[in-house]
């Protein structure tokens, strides 16, 4: 298997940077995404193993994008993970409804634990 890769689409750039650096130190190829259009472009160039996104105000945009990606052959093997700051059951349910069965409550985990959980998802 190639080096594990992750797209981090978390609204809080400080938090995204913390997670990005932790994944990089653990040997992951990391892309921190700040704009929706960048996600689509980068995904077409090189699909990640995991796409980690949060339940930010742009959550609906991310849900729409994931639904679009799931229809593309190159994105079929991507694992989509919802990172919640608070346990927003509405967002978790919406994610589950479109086939996203992984979520992590990042308020309860250290970045190293999130990395460990993502490795478990890939195995």
Image: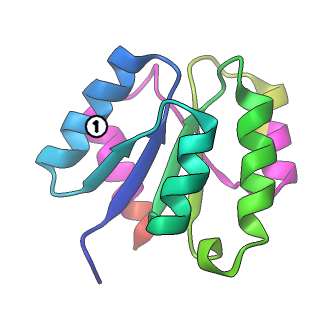
Tell me if residue 101 is in the magenta stretch.
yes
Would residue 118 be visible to someone looking at this image? Answer: yes
Give the side of residue 92 with respect to residue 43, left or right.
right
Residue 79 found in image quarter: bottom right
Give the side of residue 118 with respect to residue 9, left or right.
left
Q: Is residue 30 above or below residue 89?
A: below
Colour scheme of the picture: rainbow
| Secondary structure of the residue carrying numbered label 1 | helix
Residue 92 found in image quarter: top right
Q: How many labels does the image show?
A: 1
Q: Quadrant of the N terminus?
A: bottom left
- The residue lying at 58 percent from left, 76 percent from top is 77
- The residue lying at 56 percent from left, 32 percent from top is 35
Q: Residues within 10 Å of mark 1 (few under 14, many from 20)?
A: many
Q: Quadrant of the C terminus?
A: bottom left
Residue in the foreground of this view, choosing between 22 and 8: 8
Give coordinates of residue 76: x percent, y percent.
65, 76
Give coordinates of residue 78: x percent, y percent.
56, 67
- Circle 1 is placed at which residue position? 20
Would residue 110 be visible to someone looking at this image? Answer: no
Tell me if residue 53 is in the magenta stretch.
no
Give coordinates of residue 101: x percent, y percent.
69, 55
Q: In this view, does 101 lie above or below 37?
A: below
Residue 110 found in image quarter: top left
- The residue lying at 45 percent from left, 63 percent from top is 48
- The residue lying at 71 percent from left, 17 percent from top is 57
Residue interval drawn in magenta: 93-119
Give coordinates of residue 119: x percent, y percent.
34, 60
Give the side of residue 74 with respect to residue 109, left or right.
right
């Amino acid at each position: 298997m190639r080096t594990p890769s992750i797209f981090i689409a978390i609204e809080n750039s400080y938090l995204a940077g913390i997670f990005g650096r932790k994944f990089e130190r653990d040997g992951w190829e990391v892309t921190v995404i700040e704009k929706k259009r960048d996600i689509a472009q980068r995904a077409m160039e090189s699909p990640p193993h995991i796409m980690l996104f949060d339940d930010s105000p742009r959550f609906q945009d991310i849900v729409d994008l994931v639904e679009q990606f799931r229809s593309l052959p190159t994105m079929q093997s991507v694992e989509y993970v919802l990172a919640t700051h608070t346990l927003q059951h509405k967002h978790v349910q919406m994610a589950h409804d479109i086939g996203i069965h992984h979520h992590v409550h990042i308020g309860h985990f250290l970045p190293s634990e999130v990395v460990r959980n993502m490795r478990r998802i890939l195995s």
